[in-house]
Amino acid sequence: MTTTLIFPTALWLPTPQHPKIRLYNAEQVLSWEPVALSNSTRPVVYRVQFKYTDSEWFMTDIMSIGVNCTQITATECDFTAASPSAGFPMDFNVTLRLRAELGALHSAWVTMPWFQHYRNVTVGPPENIEVTPGEGSLIIRFSSPFDIADASTAFFWYYVRYWEKGGLQQVKGPFRSNSISLDNLKPFRVYCLQVQAQLLWNKSNIFRLGHLSNTSCYETMADASTELQQVILISVGTFSLLSVLAGACFFLVLKYRGLIKYWFHTPPSIPLQIEEYLKDPTQPILEVLDKDSSPKDDVWDSVSIISFPEKEQEDVLQTL
């Protein structure tokens, strides 16, 4: 929304509209809507001033705050533009005011409500989150949403929301450390998690709960007992499989031993003499069979006939 003025019928410029202060993590940014003039070619410029509790108003320039927000054409003043550590002290009470200017003309001052960074800041999620799956655990490392110069003034607590995929959500915390270990998780299961920071300002005992990080999921690894169980199961399974295969082979051998014997039995071969005869049928078969015969190969048995007297023969028969 812009405010339009018919120049130069008015002696005053309209005030900038809808000024707002953005306090997100370490950012301190004042923004507003521009003042538009219908018949002026010169740009409207803006001036920002600030004050602390019971102090006078100061110009926002390089010397005072590190940035220049005096007679600027932009509709934004980033007090932390120079660096995240720049800007107003986070535990100070700060008041800002703003006006528009055009040559000798200027608007009335618009004064914003005072703020304290630690009191009014919007805390984002932790940054640079890294998760390392362990043996039945997840190790989470991250950095804080923004740096705090004096840890005795303010610090962060951290919470982890986690759940087995498809299960109920659990919360672990608070922690002061930037490294958190989720232990006693089931091995080889997928767990999802979110990390959240909470700012604690000691001076005023103020808590600012931050935004949750994006959901990320990881699978846990096996612990020592699970690995031992796997080794045992694999060994038992292998032994059982080998036993079944050996039994099956033995059963098949018994069932089909005739067929196996037939497969592995050497087929009968034709005698060499007959094979030569078949190749040349003109040869006499007997000569072929006797061709390689020699007297030394003949084997003779001796038979003796012994006769018994009739009486002895009868006794022998009775004995038999």
Image (tube, rainbow, N blue to C red):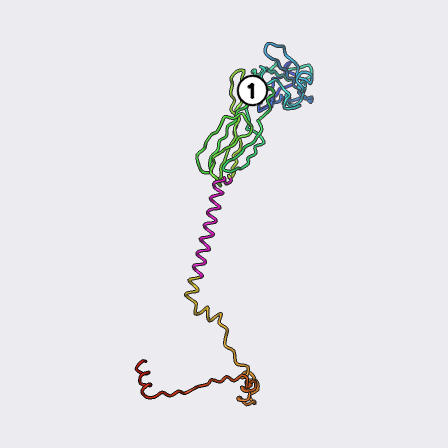
Query: Does the segment drawn in magenta span residue 282?
Result: no
With 304 as the anchor, is 274 left or right in this view?
right
Instruction: Residue 112: give x, y in percent of width and height.
Output: 57, 16
With 43 as the anchor, is 230 left or right in this view?
left
With 266 as the anchor, is 307 left or right in this view?
left
Q: Main secondary structure of the magenta part?
A: helix
Instruction: Residue 315: give x, y in percent of width and height.
Output: 31, 83
Instruction: Residue 98: give x, y in percent of width and height.
Output: 62, 17
User: In front: 95, or 230?
Assistant: 230
Q: Is residue 284 visible?
A: yes
User: In front: 60, or 313?
Assistant: 313
Count how many numbered circles sit on residues in the image.
1
Query: Does the segment drawn in magenta span residue 226?
Result: yes
Looking at the rendered image, the quarter that the N terminus falls into is top right
Q: Which residues are magenta?
A: 221-249
Q: Residue at x 53, y 20 (%)?
A: 200
Question: Measured along the vertical axis of the image, is residue 56 above or below residue 44?
Answer: above
Identify residue for label 1.
154
SS label for mark 1: strand
Dot 1 alpha-carbon crowd within 10 angstroms: few under 14, some 14 to 19, many 20 or more: many
Instruction: Residue 171: give x, y in percent of width and height.
Output: 47, 30
User: In front: 44, or 241?
Assistant: 241
Name the residue type under label 1.
Answer: Ala
User: In front: 159, or 286?
Assistant: 286
Q: Quadrant of residue 108?
A: top right
Residue that lies at the very extreme toward the left in this rendered image = 318
Q: Quadrant of residue 10?
A: top right
Q: Quadrant of residue 243?
A: bottom left
Q: Is residue 77 visible?
A: no
